Amino acid sequence: MKYRINANADTAAVAGDQILNGSDVSSILNIILGLTPIAPPSASTNLQITLGNLNVTGLGHFELPINFNNSSNMNYAEIKFNYDPALIDFQSFASQLVASGNYVNAQERGPGEAYFFFAAGNPINGNFNPGDIILKFNNGTMPIGSEIHTSYRMNGVDWQTGPTIKFSLTTIEDSQGLIPNKFELSQNYPNPFNPSTNIRFSLPEASFVSIKIYNMLGQEIKTLVNKQKNPGIFKVQWNGDNDFGQKVSSGTYIYRVVAGSRIFAKKMVLLK
């Protein structure tokens, strides 16, 4: 059964503060479901909010999975997302949480702030994923160096600082749908490594790309890439072998990336 409430924020704000929030929704659910309203219990000090791996869903769109960990007797929870509105826009919210009497939603409260809240007809315990918040990089460009800050509270008890996401080349997997705003070569990871490592780089424009591995004597060991590439963010793996498929010895190596007229180089350590 679906319930529809025709009310604006002023009349739906049960607390009388003219702001519709998780507490109001929880109270409304209690009324609709015929439950006896109770004072919200204190929030568990062990509650943690974590964000899952960023998932690119289309040109410039990405999802951030929201996870509640160690919740205890949770009636409702709220999360604020703060970001630079010149670089990032709120789009929507997706939830696969199907449970009678629960309400999940997210909305943009103002430029650079998205507000998420979850309200339960019955208190929630343990770990669960209420859904994913969907944002968009303006102009389809990942704002390398930009951050999304979060804060959260459970059952109306004291806002706490949540996780921060900083956008870098290691934030997402390969994507030609996102166009970075500058050339960049990240440090390989893991480093030191054994037996393999990943190298990420970004191209803001189509370029002929060459990636080669050298030893400390300047001798060429391996060619990883030697082809034209479209704009995007890419990951290349080196398995610690040479061009003949033979494993190389432990030591320090240099990976050199040539993209058009630009040349980048960094050191890495193979440790067996």
Image: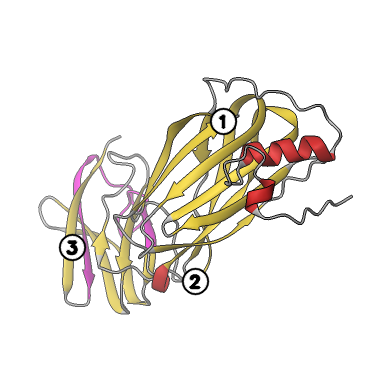
Where on the picture, by quarter, is residue 192? top left
Which residue is denoted by mark 3 in the rendering?
264
Q: Are marks 2 and 3 in contact (CB under 8 Å)?
A: no
> Does 239 lie within the magenta span?
yes
Colouring rule applied to residues: secondary structure
Q: Is residue 178 magenta?
A: no
Please indicate whether residue 255 sits to the left or right of residue 139 in the image. Answer: left
Q: Is residue 225 left or right of residue 109?
A: left
Type of amino acid at the residue the image marks with label 2: Leu
Mark nearest the camera among 2 and 1 is 1
Residue 164 drawn at (x, y percent): 39, 42
Q: Earlier in the sequence, mark 2 or mark 1?
A: 2
Q: Is residue 249 above or below residue 180?
A: above
Image coordinates of residue 182 in percent, x first then y, are 26, 68
Highlighted range, magenta: 234-259
Q: Residue at x 42, y 38 (%)?
A: 163
Residue 271, how many percent across, how many down? 27, 36
C-alpha distance separating marks 3 and 1: 50 Å
Q: Which mark is residue 156?
A: 1
Q: Secondary structure at mark 2?
A: loop
- Judging by the rendered image, the residue that carries numbered circle 2 is 59
Q: Quadrant of the C terminus?
A: top left
What amino acid is labelled 1 in the image?
Answer: Gly
